[in-house]
Amino acid sequence: PLRDTGAPTIFDKILKKEIPSTAVYEDDLVYAFRDISPQAPTHILIIPKQRDGLTQLIKAEEKHKELLGHLLYAAKLIAVQEGLEEGYRVVINDGPDGCQSVYHLHLHLLGGRKMKWPPG
Ligand code: 5GP
């Protein structure tokens, strides 16, 4: 399991366009792109453009509250854009036990198939 070291992540390279990605949504604060290893027909990652200490949700501070709401609202906008009115799932994998592998806060938006509950 991977842990937070504070080191730059692959998402910095994606944000700098040093690694290509398929953009689905962008505004002043967030960028969203298709996951390279999709776990559902629609699998999108929504990330803050500035990590600003948000390696994981548990590192969030009071000052991040507006950005956190912005990320979640972006998930809704993208769900509509992707035609997911029948349903979808928004996931944050947080920390080693949460299966986090990239330490730059991100929402997973998954849809296009019937989800299972509980998750594994
Ligand atoms: P985590 O496991 O941290 O919750 O999610 C990280 C996600 O980033 C994984 O679903 C993984 O497939 C995705 N990912 C890792 N590297 C890349 C990449 O270079 N490009 C894209 N588009 N997704 C990536």
Image (cartoon, rainbow, N blue to C red):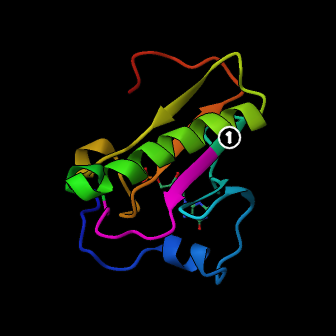
Number of callouts: 1
- On-image quarter of the N terminus: bottom left
| Front-most of residues 81 and 102 | 81
| Image: 84 above or below 96 | above
Q: Which residues are magenta?
A: 44-55
- Residue at the spot x=56%, y=79% of the render? 13
Residue 22: x %, y % from top left: 75, 61
Q: Which residue is mark 1?
A: 78
- On-image quarter of the C terminus: top left
Residue 30: x %, y % from top left: 55, 59
- Residue at the spot x=66%, y=38% of the render? 77
| Front-most of residues 34 and 73 | 73
Quarter residue 51 falls in: bottom left
Mark 1 is on which residue type? Ile
Let me know if residue 39 appears in the view: yes
Q: Is residue 12 left or right of residue 68?
A: right
